[in-house]
Amino acid sequence: MSATGIDAIAFYVPQLYVPMDELAEARGIPAEKLKKGLGLQKMAVPNIGEDAATFAANALLNLILQNNINPNDIGRVYLGTESAIDGSKPTATYAVEIVENQLASTYGERSFKHCDILDMTFACVGAVDALHNSLDWVRNNPKRKAVVIASDLSKYDINSTGEYTQGAGAVALLISHNPSILEIKDVWGVASKSEGDFFKPRRTFKKAALLKAVFKDLNLDASDEKIQEFMASSDSEFWSDSNTNVEVFKEEPVFDGQFSNACYNDRITEALNHFSEQKEVSFNDNWHKIVFHLPYAFHGRRIIFDNWLNWLKSSGLYFSLENEIGPMVDTDKKEWSKKAYKSEMYTTFINSKIAQGELASSEIGNMYTASIFMSLLSLLSDSYNNDLDLSGKTIGFIAYGSGSKSKVFEGVVQDEWVSKIADVNLFETLNERTSIDVETYENIHRAKLEKPIHNGSKISLDFIERDETNYGLRRYSVK
Ligand SMILES: CC(C)(COP(=O)([O-])OP(=O)([O-])OC[C@H]1O[C@@H](n2cnc3c(N)ncnc32)[C@H](O)[C@@H]1OP(=O)([O-])[O-])[C@@H](O)C(=O)NCCC(=O)NCCSC(=O)C[C@@](C)(O)CC(=O)[O-]
């Protein structure tokens, strides 16, 4: 059976960002905490009119144009996202429609007509699920090709501990036989457990209670009779709606930061164990590089530490660490762990296996589903820029999605990888973005602006339909 995996890769990141120094100053947080503690330099900010569909469309279009892909050859477009723009109509349909229209003059109308299009959602691991499924499907027939897109925007409440980890964008992958970039092996470590570490519930409010609060603030008669009378006679489409409750969807999650770290740690440990039950592996020796889901740049290096200690024990190298920092004494475990974390051995491990995958995350922030694929692209682009050959090397992948699930898998870099990375220009593109100040970012965050700032994006939301039969349908335009 021929190898299957990633044959081409493309990305899209919004043009706007906030420098971390400025955000730290505005929030009264030491900039060193964000920069040295979490590894953050810039936070990508979506412009007005950008959403998960426009990011995905941009990444898909880049993938097709940069690699001369004929859309008629693609049998699947599976999109992983937790920022869906509709509860029923997949975000992938919007993205494909935009791209199909753009390609019509070259490939004719409806070039994705026979393509299976789908969204998959499981927090940040949803696009890895899309990849896993697409690999299984492609593997069954040598002619099959699939596209996997990861597209998201991570938005947290202003002033929350998640705010400085925000980011946005998309990565698109072409999955095929005999891939040029990465063969992905069919061994998957999986661990799932329902947890409430991070989620985006539908929040409900009683309409009468909302009105009561408003009436009271305005010093109006807030009696139940008056409220009922108002709702029955109101011309407003909102207040006259027959539902008792108002359902509100917010992009901002409900989350518990340190608990989410603990869930991430537990799930990846279980998934790593599950992986090694299926394949004998010495993670330290066999994995040349490790790519993580990165909610912020330094998360991988912080969260893998306990597993690394166990890897040292199983590969007989623990004594080298003890030689460097001394043996652990039961009474001083915490101090010893701190020393081990700062040891030369661990620093070498981070610098040789993890740091290249962190570079793009420092410049963008959390891209949710796209973070792990952006980390792969960061590793490949940095290796390309520094003439480091990765051919034949094994990369380990550690994915996590809140709620919660981890998947662990591995891939082998193929001889042709350079030919597919040379024109991606990841870091060059990131360096061309526009800096905005904190006030402008806050106005975008609070939806106070109506028009895009600067030149706006190439693909953006044009308007939202308001007629009864197409209410809420989104229309996009391409400049
Ligand atoms: C991620 C947290 C929890 C971080 O929480 P936090 O409170 O911002 O930071 P911290 O207290 O964990 O400290 C961060 C580091 O900064 C250091 N530090 C402190 N001060 C200084 C200073 N002056 N100079 C230098 N360093 C400093 C400090 O020592 C520490 O480093 P460590 O000691 O651990 O190596 C927070 O940002 C958060 O709640 N984020 C949102 C949730 C999240 O990202 N969770 C991550 C795991 S869950 C996940 O990955 C899934 C997710 C979120 O992507 C969603 C999905 O699946 O859909």
Image (cartoon, rainbow, N blue to C red):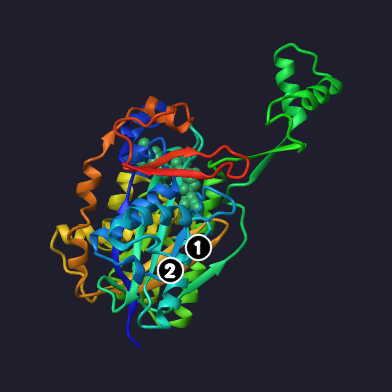
Answer yes or no: do the residues labelled 2 and 1 have beta carbons within 8 Å? yes
The image shows residue 153, relative to residue 186, as above or below, that is above
Whether the residue carrying mark 2 lies under 8 Å from ligand 1 is answered with: no
Which numbered tag is attached to residue 76? 2
Which numbered tag is attached to residue 178? none
The image shows residue 227, relative to residue 176, as above or below, that is above
Q: Position of residue 292 (x, y in %)?
A: 38, 60
The image shows residue 174, relative to residue 19, as above or below, that is below
Residue at 63%, 40% in the rendered image = 468
Q: Position of residue 350 (x, y in %)?
A: 30, 59
Total count of labels: 2
**The quarter of the picture showing ligand 1:** top left
**Left or right, 88 with reference to 455:** right
Q: Nearer the viewer, residue 472 or 325?
A: 472
**Image quadrant of residue 186?**
bottom left
**Left or right, 72 with reference to 420:** right
Residue at 47%, 56% in the rendered image = 93
Task: Identify the element where label 2 is drawn.
Answer: strand
Q: Quadrant of the C terminus?
A: top left
Q: Nearer the viewer, residue 102 or 399?
A: 102
Q: Position of residue 279 (x, y in %)?
A: 42, 82
Which residue has dot 1 on it? 118
Q: CA distance from mark 2 to mark 1?
A: 8 Å
Q: Position of residue 26 (x, y in %)?
A: 39, 26
Residue at 83%, 23% in the rendered image = 229
Crowd around label 2: few <14 · some 14–19 · many ≥20 (10 Å): many
The image shows residue 291, relative to residue 297, as above or below, that is below
Residue 342 visible in the displayed image = no
